[in-house]
C-alpha cells in the first residue's frame, strides 16, 4: 500500500468488502463471539454504510471507518492488515474539522487501546457491556487548543 491510500465515501457496494475485513478480524479474535456469517455481515453493512458517515480506504477496499457525525461517535474502524498506517489515515480523516471524537472499544482489545492512545484518545467512561455482551470502555479525543504566543500570534 502506498504512503497515502485513497479515501472515499462508502457506498452499499462496499458492504461485502467491509464485511470481509470485519469477519476476518472476528475469526482471528479468540474472545470475540462469531454470531453472524460473512453473508449476514455483508447484508448489514451494505444497508448500514450509506446511512452513516462511512469512509473506505484503498482500492480494493483495505479498511473502513463508520461514524455518527451528529454525536461525533465512531462506531467502527477496521483494517485488513494492521501496521500499514491505514487506520491512522482513516482516523486523521475522521478528525478533520472536528474538535472532539468518542468511541467504545472492547476492554480486551489491547491493540486498539494502544492505537487509540497514540491517536490522542483517553479513557473517559466506565466499563459496560456493549451490544455484543463484551465489556467495553469509552474513549474520547479532544482537538488540541491553539495557544497564543506572547506576541499575540496563534501557534
Image (cartoon, rainbow, N blue to C red):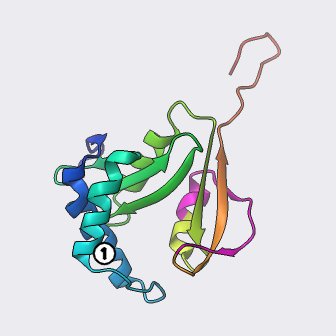
Q: Residue at x 25, y 65 (%)?
A: 43
User: Position of 36 compared to 134: left or right?
Assistant: left
Where residue 79 sits, quadrant-wise, is bottom left
**Position of residue 150 measured from the top left corner of the image (x, y, whole percent):** 83, 15
Q: Residue at x 53, y 30 (%)?
A: 97
Does 77 appear above or below 147?
below
**Position of residue 89 measured from the top left corner of the image (x, y, whole percent):** 40, 46
Q: Name the outermost residue toward the bottom.
A: 30
User: Position of 59 compared to 72: left or right?
Assistant: left
**Position of residue 44 measured from the top left corner of the image (x, y, whole percent):** 32, 64
Residue 154: in sight, yes or no? yes
Membership of 128 in magenta stretch: yes
**Position of residue 149 measured from the top left corner of the image (x, y, whole percent):** 78, 18
Membership of 123 in magenta stretch: yes
Residue to which mark 1 is pinned: 23
Q: Magenta part of the protein: which range?
A: 115-131
Amino acid at each position: 500500500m502506498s504512503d497515502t491510500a485513497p479515501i472515499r465515501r462508502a457506498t452499499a457496494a462496499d458492504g461485502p468488502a467491509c464485511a470481509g475485513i470485519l469477519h476476518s478480524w472476528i475469526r482471528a479474535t479468540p474472545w470475540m463471539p462469531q454470531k453472524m456469517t460473512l453473508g449476514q455481515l455483508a447484508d448489514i453493512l451494505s444497508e448500514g454504510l450509506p446511512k452513516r458517515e462511512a469512509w473506505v480506504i484503498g482500492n480494493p477496499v483495505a479498511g473502513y471507518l463508520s461514524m455518527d457525525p451528529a454525536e461525533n461517535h465512531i462506531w467502527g474502524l477496521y483494517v485488513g492488515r494492521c501496521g500499514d498506517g491505514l487506520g491512522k489515515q482513516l482516523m486523521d480523516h475522521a478528525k478533520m474539522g472536528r474538535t472532539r471524537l468518542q468511541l467504545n472499544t472492547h476492554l480486551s482489545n489491547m491493540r486498539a487501546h494502544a492505537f487509540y492512545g497514540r491517536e490522542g484518545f483517553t479513557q473517559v467512561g466506565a466499563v459496560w457491556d456493549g451490544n455484543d455482551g463484551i465489556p467495553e470502555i469509552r474513549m474520547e479525543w479532544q482537538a488540541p487548543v491553539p495557544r497564543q504566543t506572547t506576541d499575540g500570534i496563534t501557534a
